[in-house]
Amino acid sequence: MRTVIAGGHGQIALRLERLLAGRGDEVAGLIRNPAQEEDLRQAGAEPVLCDLESATLEEVTAHLRGADAAVFAAGAGPGSGIERKDTVDRAAAELFAQAAERAGVRRFLVVSSMGADKEPPPDTDPVFAAYLRAKSAADAAVRAHTALDWTILRPGRLTDEPGSGLVELAEHTGRDAVSRDDVAAVLAALLDEPGTAGKTLELIGGLVPVPDAVRTVAD
Ligand SMILES: NC(=O)c1ccc[n+]([C@@H]2O[C@H](COP(=O)([O-])OP(=O)(O)OC[C@H]3O[C@@H](n4cnc5c(N)ncnc54)[C@H](OP(=O)(O)O)[C@@H]3O)[C@@H](O)[C@H]2O)c1
């Protein structure tokens, strides 16, 4: 199985690459900075240079040809402003989904965010509100790609605590934190569970082992 990850040097992406490579899958990560190539190789992934804010649909499609699955794990990051929430968190996700459809990749996972399901309250910090709106718009665009077997994952606040392997995964979980280790483990399990296609799932730390949590939400 070959998986292509957008935002291949992200903190969740590197963890997912290690997990997938460790179980014998082929995995590639799209990055925009050549200095990150060696980190991907160390994680067992093939680095592919592709800046999703400047690449054409044809270029991204070419990177996705032959893949069985694609994961959008990119993000403009905490230091970025409103403009890059739009160019990365929304537009790059939309481009990646469109390219996946064109390339004939069926399985498509998105790392979205808890809170992207509703309009942010009026007192929300403007940059954070723009981020949530960008994630929401990207999720809506992904859902419109009916040829994709998409699953949208909306984690709560991310931490770098070691993964417990225990989560709560459901349509609505309530707000809480989740470790990046556990997010990566859930993504790896979702790739193997086509019964989660068409679902938008919130994720926080919990009490259920990851394989059981994913099996429970599958049709
Ligand atoms: N922080 C939270 O509490 C929280 C909660 C829920 C969901 N999320 C979301 O979860 C996702 C993953 O989180 P994370 O911690 O793994 O994020 P991260 O470490 O910030 O990784 C994001 C990656 O996206 C890449 N990227 C940015 N612009 C790009 C472009 N134009 N082309 C290609 N790649 C690009 C970055 O690469 P560069 O090194 O080149 O910048 C970076 O490697 C993000 O979308 C985040 O918004 C976060």
Image: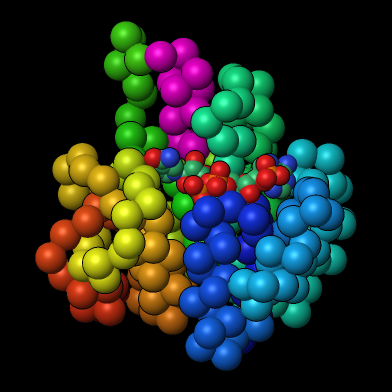
Residue 100 on image: x %, y %: 68, 63
Between 3 and 57, the one lying in front of the other is 3
Q: Main secondary structure of the magenta part?
A: helix
The structure residue drawn at horizontal position 86% and vertical position 48%, both measured from the top left corner, is 56
Magenta stretch: give its range: 125-136
Picture coordinates of residue 127, whole percent (x, y): 50, 18
Location of residue 24 (image quadrant) = bottom right
- Quarter of the picture holding the N terminus: bottom right
Find out whether residue 129 is within the magenta segment: yes
Instruction: Write down the quadrant of residue 101 in the picture.
Output: bottom right
Report x, y in % for residue 45: 68, 74
Residue 184 at least partly seen: yes
| Left or right placement of residue 18 versus residue 120 in this view | right
Query: Residue sitting at 21 percent across and 40 percent down?
Result: 175
Q: Is residue 198 above or below residue 94?
A: below
Q: Is residue 80 above or below residue 94?
A: above
Q: Which residue occupies 32% across, 41% down?
A: 157
Image location (x, y in percent) of residue 41: 72, 72
Q: Image height check: is 116 above or below 105? A: above
Task: Pick whichever, 180 or 117, lies toward us.
Answer: 180
- Furthest-top residue in view? 123
Q: Quadrant of the C terminus?
A: bottom left
| Residue drawn 35% across the image and 47% down it | 159
**Is residue 101 in view?**
no
Indicate which quadrant contains ligand 1. Answer: top right
Give the image quarter of residue 213.
bottom left
Q: Is residue 187 magenta?
A: no
Relative horizontal placement of residue 162, taking residue 145 as reference (left or right): left
Q: Which residue lies most toward the bottom here?
A: 24
